[in-house]
């Protein structure tokens, strides 16, 4: 697709201010890399819950479909409805406990529901007696102790569903500690999952899809005897944990950019931003940048983190404010200079931000807020954009994405990346 002139104007306007750039070609390459860790013929479920970890639910859903992912995973029914509204046709699993008041909407939209508690089980059965049959994956609790039937309970739940005429298309569990160094809890969970599946077999239930591994489980090889893997964090090029990093080839797909809007010098003895938690010892070149904690840039980065201006680190001076941050900029910096807030080095990665702010990269990524417009690129070419706050977006079709991704990725990870 050639971007139309209106779209180029929109993109140029957003790119002049604080915005997020999402590299869809890197997303497609990460998905292709992850397949190499999965069993042959296993399905890949791209997890796009939480607005695709802050990267954009609709666009990432469409891009995952264009790359040949078999399934998408979300946490809430409303996220699945958003995918359908954007034109996504892939099977979508709602991983978390569903809001039972939305079950009819979910079934009408062809979403698959995770049933992992008596409450949801009874609601799905009640609906089936009215002739509204949900597609179901049974959720097994193998140690997370959150949502799911135990391996001892799951066969009984399955029999009740079958008796009500509900088809069980899948069975799955979720690892609590696959991102730790110690493999023991994950080995135990996988063993308990095998028990659950045997108990299901004993009552004649052998679902098409059996899945357990998340990104960490996939990267560390906990995929035995399963027919699908689920990955969220690694698809975005981010590591499940410091102990289980993604291999070097993986690429972070998001960058946040802004600009210097006021250039000034802080004189000795003068403080910067709220409560003057930083005071100049000598004349200091400073720049005010319109990005703040309301954009998801953590307030805890006060006097710790850095921005990147003209390719060099610009240490944050004083508190990060709701809408602005001040940094020490290189002497030659002028107003209007581009500022990289996060992304590839030398900018702070989501993991570095997480470490400095006392949290992890998952939380930092999912907090890229609705206020920042997102520009979607394949190579250097913008293929779409989205502004959640304005309720406006332009997305390419799956077919347009497929051809754009194919031409750019064929050269980098081989043609199989986009089949
Ligand atoms: C979020 C989630 C995932 C994805 O986890 P990552 O660590 O991001 O790969 C997989 N399965 C379930 C049930 C989830 O809730």
Image (cartoon, helix red, strand yellow):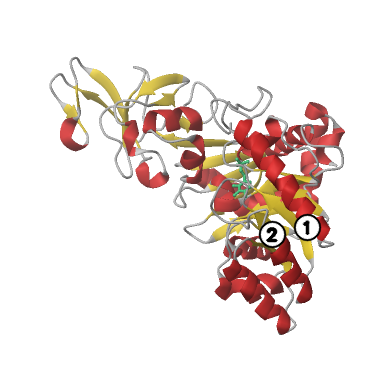
Density class for disc 2 (Cα within 10 Å; few <14, some 14-19, many ≥20) is: many
Q: Is residue 138 above or below residue 265?
A: below
Q: CA distance from mark 1 to mark 2?
A: 7 Å
Residue 360 screen position, x and y as percent: 47, 35
Judge by depth and name the residue closer to the eye, 389 or 154: 154
All told, the count of numbered labels is 2
* Ligand 1 shown in quarter: top right
> Quadrant of the rendered structure where residue 128 is?
bottom right
Left of 143 or right of it: where is 213? right
238 relative to 15, above or below: above
Question: Tags 1 and 2 in contact by the CB under 8 Å rule?
Answer: yes
Q: Quadrant of the C terminus?
A: top right
Of residues 102 and 165, the one drawn nearer to the viewer in this rendering: 165
Is ligand 1 closer than 8 angstroms to the Cβ of mark 2?
Answer: no
Most extreme residue toward the bottom is: 130
Q: Is residue 162 visible?
A: yes
Foreground pick, 209 / 412: 209
Quarter of image, res 220: top right
Instruction: Give the image quarter of residue 243.
Output: top right
**SS state under label 2:** helix
Task: Please state the horizontal and vertical placement of residue 275, each as a whole percent of the image.
Answer: 17, 35
Residue 138 x %, y %: 70, 59
Crowding at dot 1, Cα within 10 Å, few <14 / some 14-19 / many 20+, comes out as: many
Residue 196: horizontal and vertical position, in percent?
72, 52
Q: Secondary structure at mark 1?
A: helix
> Which residue: 62% across, 63% down?
82
Q: Is residue 218 left or right of residue 244?
A: right
Q: Which mark is residue 383?
A: none
Point out which mark residue 154 bears: 2
User: Can you tell which mark lies on residue 200?
Assistant: 1
Point out the tag, 1 or 2, that comes first from the N-terminus.
Answer: 2
């Amino acid at each position: 697709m050639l971007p139309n002139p209106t779209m180029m104007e929109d993109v140029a306007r957003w790119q002049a201010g604080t915005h997020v750039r999402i590299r869809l070609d890197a997303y497609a390459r990460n998905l292709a890399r992850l397949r190499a860790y999965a069993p042959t013929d296993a399905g890949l479920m791209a997890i796009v819950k939480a607005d695709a970890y802050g990267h954009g639910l609709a666009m990432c859903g469409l891009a995952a479909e264009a790359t040949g992912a078999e399934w998408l995973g979300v946490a809430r029914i409303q996220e699945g409805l958003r995918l359908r509204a954007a034109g996504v046709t892939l099977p979508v699993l709602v991983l978390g406990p569903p809001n039972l008041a939305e079950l009819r909407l979910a079934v009408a939209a062809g979403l698959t529901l995770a049933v992992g508690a008596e409450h949801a089980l009874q609601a799905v059965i009640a609906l089936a007696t009215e002739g509204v049959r949900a597609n179901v994956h049974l959720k097994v609790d193998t140690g997370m102790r959150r949502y799911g039937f135990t391996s001892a309970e799951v066969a009984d739940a399955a029999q009740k569903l079958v008796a009500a005429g509900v088809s069980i298309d899948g069975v799955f569990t979720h690892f609590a500690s696959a991102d730790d160094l110690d493999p023991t809890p994950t080995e135990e969970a996988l063993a308990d999952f095998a028990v659950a599946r045997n108990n299901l077999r004993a009552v004649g239930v052998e679902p098409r899809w059996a899945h357990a591994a998340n990104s960490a489980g996939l990267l560390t090889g906990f995929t035995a005897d399963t027919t699908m893997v689920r990955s969220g964090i690694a698809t975005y090029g981010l590591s499940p944990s410091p102990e289980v990093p993604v291999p070097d080839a993986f690429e972070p797909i998001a960058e946040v950019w802004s600009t210097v809007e006021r250039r000034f010098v802080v004189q000795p003895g003068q403080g910067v931003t709220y409560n003057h938690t930083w005071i100049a010892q000598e004349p200091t070149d400073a720049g005010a940048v319109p990005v703040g904690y309301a954009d998801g840039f953590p307030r805890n980065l006060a006097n710790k983190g850095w921005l990147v201006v003209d390719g060099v680190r610009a240490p944050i001076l004083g508190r990060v404010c709701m809408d602005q941050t001040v940094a020490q900029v290189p002497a030659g910096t002028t107003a209007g200079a581009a500022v990289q807030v996060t992304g590839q080095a030398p900018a702070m990665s989501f993991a570095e931000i997480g470490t400095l702010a006392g949290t992890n990269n998952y939380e930092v990524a999912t907090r890229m807020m609705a206020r920042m417009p997102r520009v979607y690129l394949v190579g250097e070419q913008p293929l779409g954009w989205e502004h959640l706050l304005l309720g406006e977006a332009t997305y390419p079709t799956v077919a347009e994405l497929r051809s754009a991704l194919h031409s750019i990725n064929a050269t980098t990870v081989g043609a199989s990346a986009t089949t």
